[in-house]
Amino acid sequence: MLQQLISHSPDLKRLQDEGYELEIKGGYLLIHHVPYVTHLREVKYGVLVSELSLANSQMTIKPNTHVINFIGEFPCNNYGSIISAIQHGSHNQDLGNGIVINHSFSNKPQHGYPNYYEKVSTYCNIISSPAKSIDPLITEKTFRNRETTFDTDVFQYIDTNSSRAKINAINEKVKEEKLAIIGLGGTGAYILDLLSKAPVREIHLYDGDVFSQHNAFRSPGAVGNEDLDKVSSKVDYYYSVYAKIHQKITAHHSYVSKENLEELLAMSFVFICIDNDVSRKLIIQFLLKNNIPFIDVGLGVNVVDDTLIGTVRVTTGTKEKNNHLVDRIPFVDEGNNDYNTNIQIAELNCLNAVLAVIKWKKLCGFYQDLREEHHSTYSINVNQLTSDDITA
């Protein structure tokens, strides 16, 4: 796939044809064997690391930034003083995938770099010229082809969004997660939409229902008539959509019940998105018994004076904190919830999912969590978000 990207991208092909030593890794373009002069006037070799902007898996687009990163000491001129004209930042930063940069450089043309050939060759000339003045035989053009392939992890293509944001190292905190989403109604579908962009090891979908027309109005994206005509199961429909980005999604064509509860033992985390209180209690008791953390989501929506009021709920259960669950999660039918008939409220489903996924990422250490709440609610009519049941 690397050769496909190079052959379809004139800028990368020109770099390779001229002898630059290219590697694609973790959404970054690496240029190896770049000679430079140290402050002791020694010649060493470093690595240039650039963000990689792609139109698709086979073609580059204009670089997103003129800044480039470097692995090595700060390059100097042939007298041993740093090349201050490109000075931008100097601190070690882990970009993930084994890439730890030491410096960043800035040399901005008036309109930016039109392609990666111009960007890479310009920085190589600036950095390597002092070394070549010391030894004219020195070159960055090794004509060495690195044995490398795209490491897309669990995705169908490179996650260039995370590399642009330099959060690949933070993403690694969720890489070993095996997740289950129980229930693919509105909220569960939005949770899947968000999780499909995370580099988790596995995503398991549980729902025994079919995807009907009313589901289209509280689901992410737009469902076509051709999709509805298939009368697919929910898990099959959502698998067909999200397997386009995430390779490790598994569809289970059943509800979770006593017969298949033990399948959840393989999970590291579970999202419960169902409105059957008997099943909810069964699942939660099993997860608590086996120390599997989970989030239970819920909506309560009522009609008052010809308007809708209600609450969005996210309740977390962990080994360390679960004594609040009996007071926070409905385990018997409440009987005063119009949600089941008032279905076209996708924004509430979406909000419920967003709050749940943010909380899960907090538990993973992706986001900072200063409150460590295990129960939160959003009240629509007063626009209030509360955090309760704080970890002691």
Image (cartoon, grey):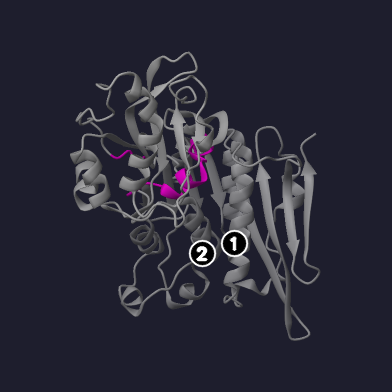
The kind of residue on which mark 2 rests is Gly
The residue tagged 2 is 185
Query: For the point 21% across and 34% down, which residue is it?
Result: 19
Residue 34 or 372: which is nearer the viewer?
34
Q: Quadrant of residue 266?
A: top left
Residue 68 placement (x, y as % from top left): 45, 40
User: Which contiguous range is marked in magenta?
Assistant: 150-173
Q: Is residue 153 magenta?
A: yes
Query: For the point 37% across and 45% down, which residue is it?
Result: 119
Disc 1 on helix, strand or loop?
A: loop
- In primary-sequence order, the first of circles 2 and 1 is 2
Disc 2 on helix, strand or loop?
A: loop
Query: For the point 30% across and 35% down, which residue is it?
Result: 23
Residue 87 or 201: which is nearer the viewer?
87
Q: Quadrant of residue 17?
A: top left
Taking the image as shown, residue 270 lies to the left or right of residue 17, namely: right
Q: Nearer the viewer, mark 2 or mark 1?
A: 2
The kind of residue on which mark 1 rests is Asp
Residue 241 placement (x, y as % from top left): 37, 61
Which image quarter is the C terminus in?
top right
Marker disc for residue 275: 1
The span from disc 2 to disc 1 (Cα, nearest Å) is: 9 Å
Residue 270 or 82: which is nearer the viewer?
82
